[in-house]
Amino acid sequence: MYPQPECHVVDLGMIEYQKSFDLQKKIVKKVIDGEVSDTLITCQHPHVITLSRMAKKENILVSQEELKKLGVGICWTDRGGDVTYHGPGQIVLYPIFDLKEDKKDLHIFLRNLEEVVIQALRNNFGLNAYRKGGLTGVWVGPYKVASIGIGVSHWVTYHGLSLNVRTDKKFYNLIKPCGLPNVKIASINDFFDDDVSLEIVRAMLLKSIQDVFGYHLS
Amino acid sequence: MIKIYLPELGENITKATVSYWYFEEGMSVVEGNDLVEMTTDKATFNVPAPCSGAIVEIMAHEGDVVEVGTVLATIEEETVENGSEEGEQEV
């Protein structure tokens, strides 16, 4: 039996988007240079709207003044996708994984990230989570619960996925999520009467990362 | 002259959009530098420089949608000077 590859997990708690991005870039370089093992960052962000280089500004539906009033920042970034929102109550995972020779496939990696969320929600919460053909992300019923956008350098991944656990969904009204029309957003807590904590969902996602990617987490 | 191709990015991915050039024509690059960011639906992929040298021509420009295997740019590879051998030839 082959030993499981090691993945170091770092929980940054609540952290500004830009700070976590700067840290990701440093870790990406170390993973490329073989100085550290694959790393998984987990965190939450204060209210922020992020845009990819290809994003259309008009997918932010309110003025900068309005965003400022609401305490919502804007960051341009180098992930795939269009525009998205991050905020308290949303778990963010940044997998910095070296896609070795036999795994050099962006499509499979994106599907695996979806699978992490799908398994976590199905196996632990009984939610019928699924992917939609032709789109990237995870849905429960008509609602999108997780968004995904990645970057890859030297076949080392960064950026990742966000899952709404108890997100204040009114902030999604500020944008056209992913640049897609009529996207309905939900949080895990919308499907239950009792509160589901971020800590529990985080633990389930880590278990799912182990199962889907075959890592030993440390 | 070294040609920079858009590599295979994975199953079902046949094309990508040039989203950002980190360098311009004429600029020097070091082997391994990220040269150009390519974007597929939900991923960006940085194509690295396969050698050190100068960018001669950029064929695929920002906003262009190109297929896997397309030449994105050419690099004139930096030659390693060998002073002693040249010196001997001169003598």
Image (cartoon, rainbow, N blue to C red):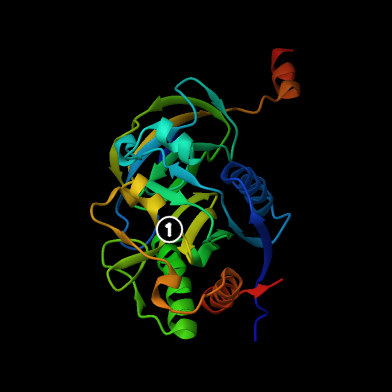
- In the rendered view, tell whether residue B24 sits above or below residue A142: above
- In the rendered view, tell whether residue B69 sits above or below residue B57: below
Q: Residue at the left extreme? A: A181
Along the viewing direction, whichever of A146 and A28 lies nearer the viewer: A146
Residue under numbered circle 1: A148
Residue A188: x and y, percent? 44, 71
Displayed quadrant of residue A66: top left
Q: Is residue A11 left or right of residue A171?
A: right
- In the rendered view, tell whether residue B70 sits above or below residue A177: above
Q: How many marks?
A: 1
Residue at position x 60%, y 58% in the image = A43
State which quarter of the image contains the N terminus of chain B: top left
Q: Residue at the top extreme? A: B91
Q: Amino acid at mark 1?
A: Ile
Residue at position x 48%, y 72% in the image = A116
Helix, strand or loop at disc 1?
strand
Residue at position x 40%, y 25% in the image = B57
Whether residue B68 can be seen here? no
State which quarter of the image contains the C terminus of chain B: top right
Question: Crowding at label 1, few (<14), some or many (≥20) Cα neighbours within 10 Å?
Answer: many
Residue B71: x and y, percent? 35, 38
- In the rendered view, tell whether residue B45 sits above or below residue B85: below
Residue A126: x and y, percent? 42, 85
Along the viewing direction, whichever of A61 and A138 lies nearer the viewer: A61
Whether residue A45 can be seen here? yes
Q: Chain of mark 1?
A: A
Residue A76: x and y, percent? 47, 37
